[in-house]
Image: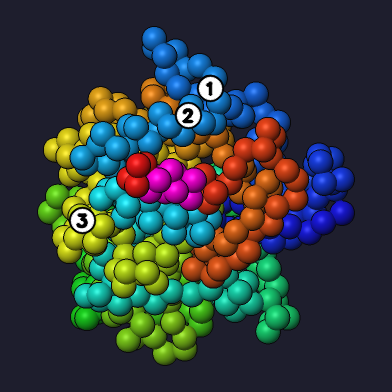
């Protein structure tokens, strides 16, 4: 029996027990269904175990030498390579991905840029009050899920955060208030108790709620009698009372809150609201947790920050960092790329058709361990080991805490890890340059 960390999502639960003989995993104890799926991926029918190249419209199995030569040829011919994904791989692999982008004068971006990265864009102007999972487990008395549905996306988060007793309290769930703000009655509403607050907000009206709360923080009686955004006056007052009266409150920001808006910056206004609330706070503070789903979505920004002193995407030119920020969306919209290297993600499914169709126009090099929509359009597919099961490395949990992931069994057919494969590509490119 071994105790390991699950890489099924960004919660990185470190209390999973597996029974293994080093060759096979016989039993997994403590993982949620999503985590169990991660372990089942080892032998899943949609697992990729061979490198493949598209020939006459069909993906056919080839040797590693042929696949790597083919990949390097695509990259060598490219003047504007685009590298994307990097949230389902370790920090070590992310570092190698950035080195590869530098070597080939590419543009590199992670899934975070269309998710939690949008919060970091406001960091320099406003600042952000983050907290850790340990703080929440031990001290939180108010949990707000805003546009987030962790009951389905990060299944064990509420078990841990809501039902934990904590080191410093004799009490647990009974002193914790859960508030859910969402336009849809998601599965997370189902864990609510009598003293919790369910706020079904009208779609796209979060900004009205934030602005009303900001006004109310500055001058009382700013809440209109008829309420705001489908939430009545009493519930709004209750919400503000909880926000200003909690000792350790945390807002979990979900994907629904990160959608772009033409005329306003929702996240900036939310951060401003938190500042106002924390100024009024008499007992404690309200903090944030970003609920990125992929197991190392937080890691990419840490790797970029520690190596280049910035965050988000990077564009290299003449093997140096170009000092301008271009978004992935603009790159795709303007078709400013002539090949893509996608790692550990499925942009053909995840991006809107207007963008994914443009991505599909140019050769796609896919590095992944499972079949996806992107797999079915890729020109070349390079399989890698499943991180946290067949390869090890570092990942950042959703509360920005680094966690070590361990290898417990060998990958099939000696498949390399993402880190090793990216290094092989760099080495092959360099040796081609020297020829
Ligand atoms: S919550 Fe996430 S990390 Fe924890 S067991 Fe489930 S999938 Fe794994």
Which of the two labelled residues, at mark 1 and mark 3, occupies the earlier sequence position?
Answer: 1
Q: Is residue 185 visible?
A: no
For residue 199, the mark is none
Mark 1: secondary structure: loop
The residue furthest top is 56
Quadrant including the N terminus: bottom right
Residue 97, horizontal then vertical, whole percent: 41, 52
The residue drawn where x is 64% and y is 55% is 392
Judging by the rendered image, the residue that carries numbered circle 3 is 318
CA separation in Å, label 3 and label 2: 27 Å
Give SS at disc 2.
Answer: helix
Pointer 2: residues within 10 angstroms few (<14), some, or many (20+)? some
Residue 71 higher or lower than 306, as above or below: above
Disc 1 and disc 3: Cα gap in Å? 33 Å
Q: Which mark is residue 62?
A: 1
Residue 360 visible in the displayed image: yes
Q: Which residues are magenta?
A: 422-431
Residue 102 belongs to magenta span: no
Residue 430 is inside the magenta segment: yes
């Amino acid at each position: 029996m071994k105790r390991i960390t699950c890489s099924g999502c960004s919660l990185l639960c470190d209390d999973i027990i597996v029974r293994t003989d080093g060759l096979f995993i016989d039993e997994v104890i403590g993982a949620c269904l999503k985590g169990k799926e991660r372990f089942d991926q080892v032998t899943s029918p949609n697992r990729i175990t061979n490198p493949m190249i598209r020939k006459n419209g069909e993906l056919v199995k080839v040797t590693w030498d042929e696949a790597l030569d083919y990949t390097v040829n695509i990259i060598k011919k490219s003047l504007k390579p685009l590298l994307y994904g990097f949230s389902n791989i370790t920090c070590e692999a992310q570092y190698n991905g950035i080195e590869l982008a530098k070597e080939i004068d590419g543009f590199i971006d992670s899934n975070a840029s269309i998710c939690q990265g949008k919060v970091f864009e406001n960091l320099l102007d406003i600042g952000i009050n983050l907290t850790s999972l340990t703080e929440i487990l031990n001290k939180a008395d108010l949990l707000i899920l805003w546009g987030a549905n962790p009951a389905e996306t990060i299944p064990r988060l509420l078990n841990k955060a809501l039902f934990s007793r904590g080191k410093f309290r004799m009490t647990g769930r009974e002193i914790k208030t859960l508030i859910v703000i969402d336009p849809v009655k998601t599965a997370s509403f189902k864990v609510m108790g009598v003293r919790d607050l369910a706020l079904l907000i009208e779609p796209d009206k979060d900004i009205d709620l934030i602005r009303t709360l900001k006004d109310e923080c500055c001058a009382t009686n700013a809440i209109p009698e008829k309420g705001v955004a489908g939430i009545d006056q009493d519930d709004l007052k209750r919400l503000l009372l909880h926000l200003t009266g909690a000792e350790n409150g945390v807002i979990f920001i979900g994907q629904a809150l990160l959608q772009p808006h033409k005329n306003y910056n929702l996240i900036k206004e939310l951060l401003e609201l938190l500042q106002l609330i924390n100024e009024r706070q008499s007992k404690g503070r309200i903090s944030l947790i970003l609920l990125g789903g992929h197991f190392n979505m937080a890691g990419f920004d840490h790797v970029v920050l520690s190596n280049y002193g910035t965050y988000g995407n990077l564009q290299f030119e003449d093997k140096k960092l170009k000092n301008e920020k271009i978004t992935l969306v603009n790159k795709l919209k303007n078709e400013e790329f002539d090949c893509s290297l996608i790692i550990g993600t499925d942009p053909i499914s995840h991006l809107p058709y207007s963008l994914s169709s443009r991505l599909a126009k140019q050769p796609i090099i896919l590095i992944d361990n499972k079949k996806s929509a992107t797999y079915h359009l890729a020109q070349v597919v390079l399989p890698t080991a499943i991180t946290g099961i067949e390869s090890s490395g570092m990942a950042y949990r959703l509360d920005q805490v680094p966690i070590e992931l361990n290898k417990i069994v060998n990958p099939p057919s000696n498949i390399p890890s993402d880190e090793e494969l990216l290094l092989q590509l760099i080495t092959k490119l360099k040796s081609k340059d020297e020829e």
